[in-house]
Image (tube, rainbow, N blue to C red):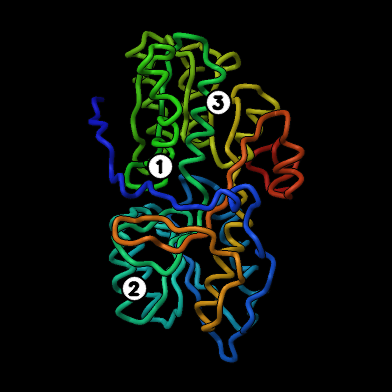
Amino acid sequence: MAINWKKKGAALSGVALAATMLTSGIASLTSTVSAKSTAKVTIALLLPDTTSSPRYETEDKPDFTADVKKLDPNATVDYQNAQGDTNTQLQQAESAISNGAKVLVVDPIDGVAAAQIVKQAQQAGVKVIAYDRLIEDSKPDYYVSFNNELVGELQGKWIADHTKKGGTVVMINGAQTDNNAVLFRKGALEVLQPLFNSGKLKLGYQTYTPNWDPSTGQREMEQALTKLNNKVDAILAANDDLAGACIQAMNEQHLSTKNIPVTGQDATDAGLNRIYYQGTQSMTVYKAVPKEAEAAAELAVALATGSQPPKGLVNGTTQNGMENVPSVLLKPVVVTKANVASTVIKDHYTTWARIKNPGKTS
């Protein structure tokens, strides 16, 4: 599948962030919002799907809901999931507005299309927080996410450091409609493009993956293997689900990934199982979702109650094509077999039992 790889929305990649904030982390995430509502308020949480990552149901939804209730017992969270349908997400936003939501926390399926959500919310006097993925060409009140170019840089550096000289790299990126996926790719190429240009590494195949769909990702990897006559020395997969799909495609050709670098993201139980127990995936990029959900809850309750967010919580801005959106930007971390215990286990993000038996809840 031939793809035109012209850069998409260069303005979207600008992230103004103080270096000291990146190294010190986000201050005051555990402080409470100064004012609570005297009447019941509704905050809508609109998540994109349940297929691109299991985190939305297992982490974001319960964490955000619990954090909001802790900050303001009078607040209600109206949770909706659009299951990958942009029109459904717009309808859910319209319904939340009609039902009296004071704040919409939106993780957009399509960052461009979601500008309509911001427009309708503002017309109704409703505040909007872009959550995890940027809403483009609009004026949301806040953006809460991670330094997403750094996510890609971490993946690209892993490939650069662990691929043999002259090796052939396959890049299976996320959905082009997701601005995060664009930034992940951009960050990775900041590291890898000079190596491709010099011939130290070869870019054998790359593509975006509509809807982050793993089955599509597996087909893409199969196409890469056909094109490259099964000669693949590294796989940059944008997240753990795509990594698993790529590994499956390799296995079907009786090719092992134990001796080549395979990246991932999200620190899923399945991904961590492949890293720690199977050795078929090299690393994942861990994004501490509980901290992201907590930051979004802090801002949402502040907006809903007309109070100020904790000092130091907002630590940067992100250009979305229309304005520099006030942002909370958290720092991602590389997880390998060597530091599973000191990262995701220490943070209570998951458990050894879940990693050993992915998909089980106990």
The one nearer the camera, 77 or 329, is 329
Q: In which quarter of the view is residue 268 placed?
A: top right
Quadrant where the N terminus sits is top left
Residue 38 is situated, as x and y percent measured from the top left of the image, at 60, 91
- Horizontal side of residue 238 vs 1, given as left or right: right
Mark 3 lies on residue: 158
Which comes sooner in the sequence, label 2 or label 1? 2
Q: Residues within 10 Å of mark 2 (few under 14, many from 20)?
A: some
For residue 139, above or below residue 271: below
Q: Which amino acid is tagged 2?
A: Glu
Which class describes the residues within 10 Å of circle 1: few (<14), some (14-19), or many (20+)? many
Q: Which residue is mark 1?
A: 183
**Mark 1 or mark 3, which is nearer the start of the sequence?**
3
Residue 165 placement, left or right of 269:
left
Which of the two marks, 2 or 3, is nearer to us in this view? Answer: 3
At mark 3, the secondary structure is helix
Q: Is residue 305 above or below residue 12?
A: below
Disc 3 residue type (three-letter): Trp
> Which residue in the structure is indicated by mark 2?
94
The part of the image, by quadrant, that contains residue 137 is: bottom left
